[in-house]
Amino acid sequence: MAPVSEPIGPNTMLPAHRTRETLETADGFELVAELALPLTATPRATLILVHPLPTAGGSMDSHLYRKIAWRLPALADLAVLRFNTRGTSSEFGTSQGRFDFAGRERFDLDAAIQFARAKFLPRIWLVGWSFGSDVVLLYGNQPGVEGAILLSPPLLRADDAALAAWNAGPPPVANANPGVEHAPGKPLVVLVPALDDYLRPVAARARFNRVKQAEIIAVPDAHHLWTGERFVSIVLNEIVGHVLPGSPPLPDTWPAA
């Protein structure tokens, strides 16, 4: 007899192989992290999650990132690496170091990418939410990263030069981050809540127009924090649809009906 499917709700944790990890940064700090892998399948791609502003309560345990880690290894065969940036505390633990306003967080993102490479995780995509999107824009445009998905980008720290470095055309004249080896032309998917507190769709299109391959997706009625299962579903489906093109919509029950 087939198991009875149950609805996937806000606190549903689907089966996965989950391990606590420690990321080591080039400047000598240890970051708490979790790697979630499909329980039986080989991962089809990898998501590295960079969380919202820690001074406003953002962390690897922020609700969207919990749900990505709890659902997508089972629903889409994705590997999910989430971590607390330097000085960030959450239920999962506290990373060493001190918050640096998207400065030395470059080392944190580098550590996550290097960890994924060392584990031979396939097809690395970065997901940055709010503050995390600035970190991704500033430091994530690296060889070995396939693309990036930005959620509610405020563009408070990532300037026009950082955006231009992602453009599929010629590299910018001035490199805003000379320590980063840029690889222009990577996919850049930008989910913008229509009711965002910082950057709404019209302004987002104007700011991202220097990145010709950027895809701006306006989400009606959504707010900066993506609260509500309706919006969680939109975000997760957009992530899977871009990382694994042609994938069907995610099921809302488990086991999938």
Image (tube, rainbow, N blue to C red):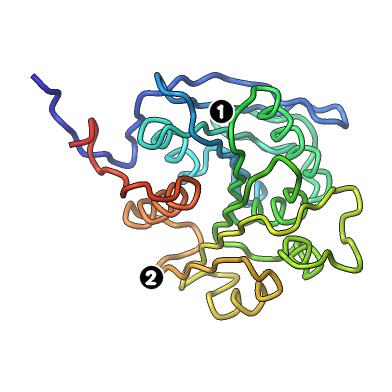
On the image, which quarter does residue 31 sit in?
A: top right
What residue sits 64% from the left and 65% below the top? 154
Q: Which mark is residue 39?
A: none
Say how many tags the image has: 2
Left or right? Give the position of 64 relative to 127: left
> Which x, y percent locates residue 84?
65, 36
Q: Residues within 10 Å of mark 2 (few under 14, many from 20)?
A: few
Q: Which mark is residue 221?
A: 2
> Which x, y percent locates residue 80?
53, 33
Q: Secondary structure at mark 1?
A: loop
Q: Quadrant of the C terminus?
A: top left
Q: Secondary structure at mark 2?
A: loop
Between the C-alphas of marks 2 and 1, the distance is 31 Å
Q: Amino acid at mark 1?
A: Phe
Depicted 38 relative to depicted 210: above or below: above
| Mark 2 or 1: the one toward you | 2
What residue sits 73% from the left and 37% below the top? 87
What residue sits 63% from the left and 21% below the top? 21
Q: Amino acid at mark 2?
A: Asp
> Which x, y percent locates residue 210?
71, 74
In the depicted view, which residue is nearer to us: 99 or 8?
Answer: 8
Depicted 177 relative to depicted 67: above or below: below
Q: Quadrant of the N terminus?
A: top left
In the depicted view, which residue is nearer to us: 243 or 53?
Answer: 243
Left or right? Give the position of 102 relative to 247: right
Depicted 59 relative to depicted 163: above or below: above
Depicted 195 relative to depicted 255: above or below: below
Which residue, given by chain and number where applicable, does mark 1 sit on? 92
> Which x, y percent locates residue 169?
75, 67
